[in-house]
Image (spheres, rainbow, N blue to C red):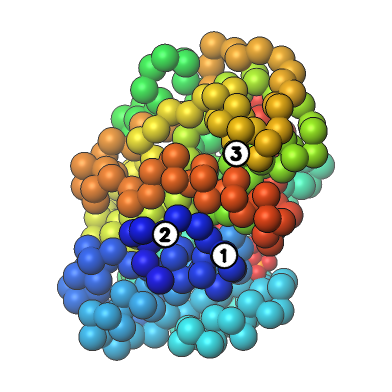
Amino acid sequence: MHLNGTTTIQSSEQLEDLLSEPTEAVVEMMRRVEGDIILLGAGGKIGPSLSRMAKRASDLAGTKRRIIAVSRFSAPEQTANLHAHGLETVRCDLLDEAAIAQLPAAPNVIYLAGLKFGSSGNEAAMWAMNTWLPGVVCRKFRSSRIIAFSTGAVYGFSPVGANGSSENEEPAPLGEYAMSCLGRERMFEYFSRTWSTPIALIRLFYACEVRYGVLVDLARKLIAGEPIDLEMGWFNIIWQGDNNAMTLLALEHAATPPFLLNITGPEILSVRETALTMGGMLGVEPQFTGLETATTCLGNATKSHRLFGAPRVAADQLIKWTADWVKRGGEYLGKPTHFEVRDGKY
Ligand SMILES: NC(=O)c1ccc[n+]([C@@H]2O[C@H](COP(=O)([O-])OP(=O)(O)OC[C@H]3O[C@@H](n4cnc5c(N)ncnc54)[C@H](OP(=O)(O)O)[C@@H]3O)[C@@H](O)[C@H]2O)c1
């Protein structure tokens, strides 16, 4: 099954194949990059398909390496699925320093761990996870290169009508979650400068696939007849498979001080227009509440597109796949993005 020509996604198996389909550039890169890859916090929404893409690309490149997925694996069936695709797994609570010390060494680290939802009222745990843990990981993997996920939330809002926040903009995080994520970046930066550890920080704006993401949230609200809040009036998204490819390609850009990279799609989507389009596909008249405000959370990912090319999947394709999947009652991860939140509280 290939991305090109896929008009509908019929099963979770097909979806996972598509999400882990490597680009030629990723396969080529695997020929140049040496050594094992360890992914920390691999049990969430991105980790499984990202690990699998790394494995597929490495195999296609004819290289041998271990791809090691580390997480608590709160969903136990995940490990069997990863093993079936040739990945190794290590069950580990990353907040346990002794357990981190036991992790295998690897020259390439991809850091995905984080705490966002449920963090209101649980702020101390959120800061430990998002800001303290990066220091522990840097100590363990100081001789490796590290690709660490951050978030577009570190920028705060940008004016509607502009092109979104770029990497050279000063961060202005709104609320404690976004502040703790800037703390995560600063800890990686500090240890990168101190120990010359090459690092890339990925400021991601809304990865999407058909089981979760902003489009799934919109489609489910439309079907439930719930009003759609217009105050966060615009957004951008990227097909998670394209995010996976760009994240792996960032391995060759890790640097001291850290290399900053926004990852998202080139389209600026209006919530209102997208809801109307999806409503048409779902046979539902959207209900709206509120009005568009002057600012929104938007990333300008020109740098990543210049380096790695535009995403393979355009937003309109993603909209069609998602509406079709949700209409048919396809699997739902039960992880809403809460993209409409404007006070920074999750
Ligand atoms: N998805 C997006 O659109 C998006 C957008 C912006 C930024 N990001 C960032 O990208 C990163 C990855 O995204 P994601 O969507 O895959 O996040 P996610 O679904 O929250 O996955 C992170 C995973 O880390 C694991 N984890 C959490 N605490 C842990 C601990 N103490 N020890 C070991 N593992 C732990 C959890 O899996 P287990 O339960 O198996 O441990 C969790 O599912 C996140 O840090 C997020 O900040 C994502």
At x 28% / y 36%, what residue is drawn?
302
Where is mark 2, residue-wise? 6
Please state, as top left, top right, bottom left or bottom right, where the N terminus lies in the image.
bottom left
Q: How many numbered badges does the structure rendering display?
A: 3
Where is ligand 1, by quadrant? bottom right
Mark 1 C-beta to ligand 1 under 8 Å = no
- How packed mark 1 is, by other alpha carbons closer than 10 Å (few <14, some 14-19, many 20 or more), is few
Instruction: Using the numbered discs, state the Cα–Cα distance from disc 1 to disc 2 in whole angstroms.
Output: 10 Å
Where is mark 1, residue-wise? 10
Please state, as top left, top right, bottom left or bottom right, where the C terminus lies in the image.
top right
Image spot of residue 70 (x, y percent): 55, 75
Dividing the picture into quadrants, the one containing residue 166 is: top left
Dividing the picture into quadrants, the one containing residue 95 is: bottom right
Q: Is residue 191 above or below residue 30?
A: above
Left or right: residue 149 versus residue 340 is left
Where is mark 3, residue-wise? 281
- How packed mark 2 is, by other alpha carbons closer than 10 Å (few <14, some 14-19, many 20 or more), is few
Q: Which mark is residue 291?
A: none
Image spot of residue 49 (x, y percent): 49, 67
At x 28% / y 45%, what residue is drawn?
310
